[in-house]
Image: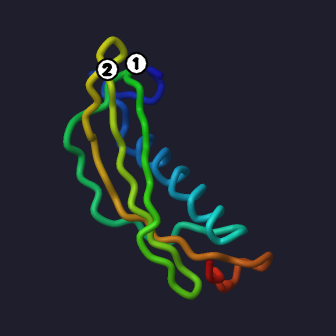
Amino acid sequence: MPADANAYGDIFGGWLMSLMDMGAGLIAARRSHGRAVTVAMDGMQFHSPVKIGDEVSVYGELRKVGRTSLVIGIEAWRRPRHQEIANKVTEATFTFVAVDEDNRPRPVGQE
């Protein structure tokens, strides 16, 4: 939406990063069977802008499960409204820690 963009119609990188964090958070919560919080985000570089009206999709992959942590790779893709071809905009690696009701790290558990 226009409120999420700069004067040139490019979506703010922070908005896109938030979308990616939410996608990674869903993967972390599902795998850890509870609350998991973001503790790090590494390696984000923007390859092309996202314009107002573009369709944005994020895809995630669980890369590593530690005792209390999860590492999740996320890619963001854009597709212009009236086109069929999508382009990768950015990617990043998010690290989450599973936490208990007191916000202390808890074991993720094995599957």
Residue at 51% of width from left, 84% of height from top?
66
**Label 2: few (<14), some or many (≥20) within 10 Å?**
some
- Mark before the other along the chain sequence, 2 or 1: 1
The answer to the question of whether label 2 and label 1 lie on touching residues, with beta carbons closer than 8 A, is yes
Relative height, residue 45 to residue 66 (above, below) = above
Between tags 2 and 1, which lies in front? 2
Q: Please, which residue is most extreme toward the top here?
A: 82
The amino acid on which the numbered mark 1 sits, given as a three-letter code, is Gly
**Label 1: few (<14), some or many (≥20) within 10 Å?**
some
Q: Please, which residue is most extreme toward the left here?
A: 47
Q: Which residue is mark 2?
A: 80
Disc on res. 1: none
Residue at 43% of width from left, 37% of height from top?
57
Near-viewer residue (6 or 11): 11
**Residue 103 quadrant:** bottom right
Relative height, residue 89 to residue 20 (above, below) = above
Side (left or right) of 65 relative to 12: right
Q: How is the image coloured?
A: rainbow
Side (left or right) of 34 relative to 93: right
Q: Name the spot of residue 11 as percent of width and height, x first.
A: 36, 31
The amino acid on which the numbered mark 2 sits, given as a three-letter code, is Pro
Disc on res. 53: 1
Q: Name the spot of residue 75 as percent of width and height, x first.
A: 35, 49
Near-viewer residue (102 or 64): 64
**Secondary structure under the numbered disc 1 in the rendered image:** loop
Q: Name the spot of residue 79 as percent of width and height, x first.
A: 33, 26
Residue at 50% of width from left, 78% of height from top?
65
